[in-house]
Amino acid sequence: MTDNPFAETSLYKWGMVIDQDLCIGCQACVTACAMENNVSFVGETDADYGRTMHWLYIERFWEGEYPHVKSTPFQPLLCQHCEHAPCEPVCPVFAAVHSLSQKTNLQVYNRCVGTRYCANNCPYQVREFNWRDYPRPDPLPNMLHPDVTVRRRGIMEKCTFCLQRLLQAEDKAGAEGREFVDGEVVTACAQVCPTEAIVFGRIDDPESQVSRLKRDGRAVILLEELGTLPSITYLKGGSSYGRSG
Amino acid sequence: MVAAAEPLEQAHPMETELQHEHLMLDPRPRGEMNGMVMEAMHTRTWKFWLIAILLGISVVVNLVIAWGYLIAEGLGVAGVNKPVYWGIFLVNTVYWIGISHAGTFVSALLRVMKAEFRRPFTRAAELLTTFGLIQAGFSIFMHLGRVWLAYWLFPYPNIRTIWPNFHSPLGWDFLAINTYLMASTMYLFLPLIPDLAMARDRSTGWRKVFYRLLSLGFRGTEGEWTHLRTAMTIFAWAIIPVMFSVHTIVAWDFAAATRPGWSSTVFGPYFVVGALQSGIAAVGMVVVLIRATMKNMKYFIRPEHLDGIGKLMLVVSMIWAYFFFQDYMVQWYGGDKFTKMLLEFHEKGPMGWMWFLMLIFNVAVPLLTLWNKKIRRNPALLFTIGVLINIAMWFERYIIIPTSLTINRMPFTWKIYVPKIEILLSIGTFSLFILIYMLAARLIPLVPVWEVQEGQVAHGIRKLGKATVKTVGEIE
C-alpha cells in the first residue's frame, strides 16, 4: 500500500460470515439492502423478463424431481468482495476498482460506461445492470438514502458492504481517537437478519466475532478453486436441514 | 477482347487459350483499360438507385431511429439480460472485424507473397476492411450502456488525470481496432492515389474537384512512383502483424475472462483463422457480385480469380476445422464440470441447430465442394458457398458469445438469450455496409487499374522449344 501515493491509510479489512444453516430464506436482507442502497424497483414487465435488481438475493437449489426433492440450504448471495477480483482488471475505464482503504470492491457509478464486461467476468454473477431508468413515483423519492448515489440507466452496480455506514463508523472512531469496536457497524442485511445468520465485522482482527466464525469447521468459500479470495465465508453442513449427502 | 486478340491472329491456339484464361496475359492499351474502369464507375442503372434507396430507408429506420430509441430508452429495449450481458451487438462486432481481415489478408499478404491473381480485386477487398471496421465500431458503440461517454475509452489528457485501464482487454481492443482502422485506411488509400489521378484526368465537374483533392497532385513522375512503392511495401509488411494482433486481441476479450467456454488458450489463433474464414468468403461474394453487376468487370475478374479465392477458402476452411477441433478437444478433455455442461449445451441446447449448421457450412460444405475446379469457377456456386460460410461464422460467434454466456458457475442465474431490437440494428449495420460499398464503388475506381497494368507488363508468353509458357518478370 505504501508505494501508492494515492493510498489512504488502511485501517480495517471488512468481511462477512453467512451461516446457511441459520438462514430461513425470509428475504428480510434483500428488502433491507434495497432500502438502504436506493436499489431500483424494476417494475412488473422487466421483473418478468428476469431483470429484477438486487444487490443481494437468496439462492435456493434442490435436487431431484418432486416429490423426492432434496433441498439444499438457502444461500444469500452478494458481492463477495474478492481480494483478487475478476471484475476489476477488465473494466476499461476504471469503474470497477479496489478500495485500498476498506479493502472492498467498489463500483464508481459516474465512471461506468456500461461495457458490462465486469458482470460477464464475475463468477458469482452478483453485479446488476441498470437496463433502463426506472421510475420512482412521487412518495418514493423521499425514501432515498441521501448518502447513496442514485444510479441511472446504462451503468453497473453492486453490493458495497454498505460503504456509507463503514465510512461513517470509521470517521466516528477516528474522530474519537480510538480503535473501532467490533459490532459497532453492520451492513443493512446483517442488521435485519432475524436469525443472525449474517455476521459482519473486521476480519483483520482475529478476536472479532466474524473471524471466530471463519475458523468454524463448517466454513466454505464459494468457488474457492478460482482463487478470487472472497471476503465472505459461508457456514454450511451443520444442521439436519442443510446436510446434503 | 477482340481488340487485344487481333495482333496475335496467327497465334498458337495454346496462346489464345492462355490469354483467355489469364488477365495478366491479355493486355489492353492503357487508355482503353482506364476508360473501362471509368465506365464501370459511371454506369448507374435504375436498379442501382432502387437498391440504394431501399438500403437508405433501411439505414434510417433500422440504424438511426432504432439506435436513437435504444440510446433514449436504455439497453432495456434490447434482449440482453443477466447472465447474457453480451448479445448480438458483440457478435456483430466480432463478425465485422472478421470480415475486415479479408482486405488485409488478400491484399497485403498476397502482395508480399507476390500472388499475381490478387491484382484485380485487392481494392474490393480493402474496401471490405475499412467499411467492415466502421460497422464493427458502430456495433460496439451500440452495445455500450452509456454510449455518450464512449470517449472515456480514449487515453486523452483530462483534469482528473484518469486514464483508461490498460489492464483491460477491452481497452486493448479499442486501441487495436483504432490502429487497424487507421492503418487499413492508409493502406487502402496509398494504392488508390494513381487511380484517383487517372480518374481526375478523365472527369469533369465536381468529380474533377473531388479526385483532384484526393489524388494529392499525383502526376506519375519517377520520384512519386518510387515513394509510393516504398510506402506501400512498408505498409503491406507492417499491416500483417497488425491484422494478426487485432483479432488475437478480440479473442482475448473472451480468453482472458474466467468463464467456462471462454477461458481457452487457443482462442487467439482460432479467432484469426475464423476471421480469415469469413473474410475470404466475403471477398468471394463481393467479387462475384461486382463481376455480375458492374460494367466491364468480366474482363477484369475471370474464372481464374474465382478459382484462386475458392482455393483459399478451401485451405482456410481446413485450418479452421483443425483449430475448432483443437479448441473443442482440449476443453472437453479438461473435464471441468461447467465447461462440460456448456459443451453439451452447445450441441443439445435450444441453439444446438446452430452448432450443427456451423460445422456443416464451415467444414462439410467447403470440403465437399471446393476441391472441384468446376464448382470453384462457377460464380453462383462460389457465391452460395460464401454465403453459407458467412452464416456459419456468424453462428460461431453467436455460439461463443450469447450461447456460452447462458451457462455459468451459478446455475441459479441461467437464462436463454432472445434478441429483440438487436435484430433491427443488425439489419441496419448490414444495410449501411452494402450501401456505402455500393456508393464507394461508383465513386472510386474499384479495380486497381495501374496494378493490373503493371502485372500485364511483367507477364508474357514465351516459346520454350515447342512449349508455350507463361513468364513473369520482376518489376520492383
Image (cartoon, rainbow, N blue to C red):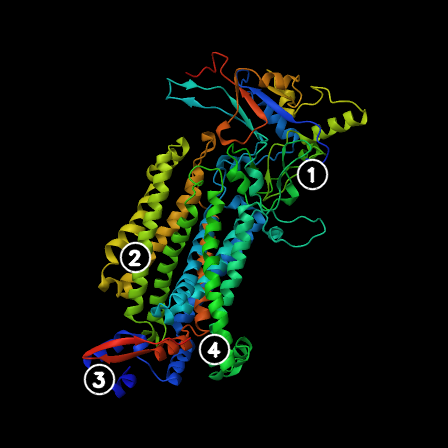
Give the residue type at disc 4.
Answer: Pro
The answer to whether tags 1 and 2 share a subunit is no
Disc 4/disc 3 C-alpha distance (Å): 34 Å
Disc 2/disc 4 C-alpha distance (Å): 34 Å
Secondary structure at badge 2 equals helix
Q: Residue furthest right?
A: A176
Q: Name the residue under label 2.
A: B314
Q: Name the residue under label 4.
A: B194
Disc 3/disc 1 C-alpha distance (Å): 83 Å
> Crowding at label 2, few (<14), some or many (≥20) Cα neighbours within 10 Å?
many
Q: Nearer the viewer, residue B458 or B4?
A: B458
Q: Nearer the viewer, mark 1 or mark 2?
A: 1
Disc 1/disc 4 C-alpha distance (Å): 57 Å
Give the residue type at disc 2.
Answer: Leu
Residue B434 at least partly seen = no
Q: Residue at x 26, y 80 (%)?
A: B462
The answer to whether tags 1 and 4 share a subunit is no
Q: Mark 4 lies on which chain?
A: B
Secondary structure at badge 3 equals loop
Q: Which of B250 and B220 is in front in this view?
A: B220
Give the residue type at disc 1.
Answer: Asp
The answer to whether tags 2 and 4 share a subunit is yes
